[in-house]
Image: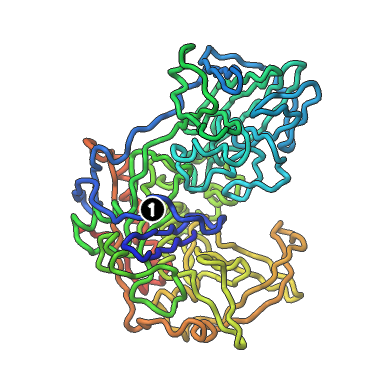
Amino acid sequence: MTPRRTKLRTTVALRALLLVCGLMVNALSPCAGQETPGHSIGQVSVAGDLIVIELDSATLGQPNLFDLVGRTLRFSPAGSRYRVTNETLRWDAHYGVELTGADVRLQRFTFPFSGQRWSSFSVGTAGSIRFGPPPSVGDVDAYGRPDGGIAAAVGRFDRLADVAPRLGERAPAICVFLKPRMSGPRYVRELADRVVITWDLTEPFGGYLDFSWFPTTNLFQAVLHRDGSIEMSYKTMEAKDGIVGIYPSLSAGERVQSIDLSSLTPKSGSLAALCEAFHYLMPPRPQDLSCTVIQALGDKFDFLAYYSDFRIDNQEASSPSDGPIGGNVTGIGDTKHAQTKPILESRCTDGRFQLGLYQPIFVGANEMQERPPDNAPGGNPKNIAFYTPLLAQATPDGKPRPYNYAVGHLGHEIGHRWSAYATARVNGETISLGAWPHWDTGLEARVAYPYSLPLESSTQGGSAWQDNLDGTFTPLRNGFFVPASGYSYLELYLMGLIAAAEVPDFYIVRPLVRIGTDANERPIFKGQRMRITIQDVIAAEGPRLPDVNHSQRQFNTGIVVIVEHGRKPSAELINRANGIRRQWIDYWAITTGHRSSMTVDPH
């Protein structure tokens, strides 16, 4: 994940930056809404070793879930505006040819939209159509994947409710059902007077970021007519959150109207541009969550993890992190967080609390489930089901340890308390060991005390490299923390758990140039190996203080279950949170070589 910086402005206002969940993206821009200090937003009680927050009534707002299944929206031109009607489903069962790219070139007519006639447009994987620059111009989504539509306008942690009115700023576009991270085939069929575009998509599945172990069915269609009218039809939709709208270029003074598409009537009038965002509940702010717990129970938690029985307006089931990390420890590198009184007060801590999940994780998400179902697809090495046989072989009882996604995520996020920020000074030159805040892929970062498998790479990045002794290198494991992995010797030193003398020499390989694949289908890279010692790190960062003889060894995590106002935690939420709690204690003991202990004690 990627830690977000916390900076103090010249005023008391602050902007907390996220610890981004997932190794596949770079640090994102600061989240909006983090400038004000936190305050309590609910009633706190204790259930065994769990903390329970019953939120205040207005905290989460109202959801707006998709309600257009079996319907067709018809957008009829009225000058430069549109009249919209909500009609019984019209569906063209002849899909035409499957797209292999995004670009569609019309041969039989041109389509009028946004003051122009178009002979070509781009069809996005995630449910949108873009007019203007072709996808070769370089738009990719927040996960680095080319889309072809306007998914690139949606940031990784953007709320759909917030971003929907802004989507037309990049290019004229139509959102038939824009939901980031969806994938699947798209089809196009051109006739003399219309072109039919059909999407047959699934929501993401199987990963720790996902809400489902299995593919979902989302079958929807757009028809663009020669006369400029547009039809959007929804046959089968399992997704309940997405964006529907039309976004022509607007004249000065005009804006995109947010409307309720299901309530349209012939008397609704005409609009220049319109949209509806379908979404789950509004997420609570992380500083409000930490303040709610700490004000009620005291400043006695190093870390806080939140779980809920409701979904929030977010495209990922997992969570980034937030907190004033970096206090009272030096020699670990630049955490890019300021330990000032206003920042600590914003999280209601005197300095004990360091890091918490940014938002609650839904009880139905993959991350909160004990194990994947026996028949879950396992073809993707970033899904835990891929490793089920290996995980079973690595345990004494032949069963994979439970809640692997949950503890792997917690281990990664909480690892950001100390890493990956360090540099090294080699032969008088300061060497970066990674782009803040993850280790470089080329860094040799084998885990000292593995958790899931006999050989692991650090949960904070890097790789477990095999030096082929011919100028080439093979990664035996990489730093993507599925399955859950532990910490390298360097990290255990930065955590204050081992002495500098216990850190073996390591190396970094740069630049990495892929040149082939070995017999086991593992990639082979060519690069230059640079030896690094712990003394090189100390030369760059100074000694780790407090040192191994005086560092903190006992830590306390608050496991918090969150419910809506007037509700009690479900048995499922309590059972799964307790399962994560028990496994988190074991994970910490194993991955720190029993040199540190983790309690989960609300008292």
Q: How was the colour assigned to the protein in this rendering? A: rainbow
Instruction: Give the percent coordinates (x, y) of residue 91.
Output: 62, 16
Q: Which residue does the numbered mark 1 point to in the structure image?
A: 358
Instruction: Give the percent coordinates (x, y) of residue 64.
Output: 40, 30
Work out whether residue 554 or residue 268 is closer to the camera in this orientation and state it.
268
- Residue 455 seen by the camera: no
| Left or right side of 570 for 453 | right
Residue drawn at the location 70% of the way across and 41% of the way down: 133
Dividing the picture into quarters, in which one does residue 98 lie? top right
Instruction: Give the percent coordinates (x, y) of residue 469.
Output: 73, 76
Work out whether residue 567 or residue 128 is closer to the camera in this orientation and state it.
128
Residue drawn at the location 23% of the way across and 43% of the way down: 54
Residue drawn at the location 69% of the way across and 48% of the way down: 138
Instruction: Give the percent coordinates (x, y) of residue 422.
Output: 50, 75
Give the secondary structure at mark 1: loop
Q: What amino acid type is highlighted by mark number 1?
A: Tyr
